[in-house]
Image (tube, helix red, strand yellow):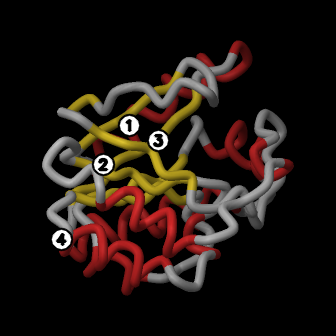
Amino acid sequence: MKHVLFPITYNCNLKCSFCKEWQKDSVKDIPAAVDKLKEKAGDVEWVFITGGEPLLVEELIWVCDELRAAGFKVGVTTNGTIFKPEILDHIDIIGVSIDGDKEFHDNARGEGVYDKAISFLQYAKDANKCETAVMSVALEDNQDALQNLKPILEAIDPTYWQVQTDINNQGVPIPV
């Protein structure tokens, strides 16, 4: 599977303890970036839209529609705290970041973030409009928390669980 990661923005509504992506400069000209991606149509199957937090981008639905019309399958990764269920009609897979059990996740990402992420993931799974994925970052201090996440994954039953070894390594989705 050939794929491209498209960090559409580095802006984020969270300041996770292990992430500094929000300090980078975001894409200045989204339509130009989309046009560049369209040049890859036929050579690339998937475009995974990442960030920062992609759901902060006003043009996100337009971007997804443009990319799908060009023949790409489209995925979006979100922290799950911005509830925009309409995105599910415009993508092929939604990835929600969950890095372990509630205690670890909220300590790393912010109070209440775990419940919002789980709720968004459950909503996406129940809506059955696109595939679902849990996106986790494996850190030195969350190995037990990742193990504690397994019963939650079994209950929600996402299509994939992707575990990254660091935030710069996007990993490979593994069917659950």
Numbered disc 1: secondary structure: helix
Badge 1: few (under 14), some or many (20 or more) residues near its Cα, within 10 Å? few
State the quadrant of the N terminus.
Answer: top left
Query: What mark, if any, has residue 28 been given in the picture?
Result: none
Q: Amino acid at mark 4?
A: Asn
First of labels 4, 2 by sequence position: 4
Q: Which residue is mark 4?
A: 128
> How far is disc 2 from disc 1 in space, using C-alphas?
6 Å
Looking at the image, do the residues carrying marks 1 and 4 touch, with CB atoms under 8 Å apart?
no
Q: Which residue is mark 3?
A: 135
Mark 2 vs mark 3, CA separation in Å? 16 Å
Residue 51 x, y percent position in the rendering: 61, 54
Q: Amino acid at mark 2?
A: Ala
Residue 175 is drawn in which quadrant? Answer: top left
- N-terminal of the pair, mark 1 or mark 4, is 4
Label 2 sits on residue: 155
Give the CA separation, mark 3 to mark 4: 18 Å
Q: Badge 1 is on which residue?
A: 151
Residue 75 location, x and y as percent? 34, 57
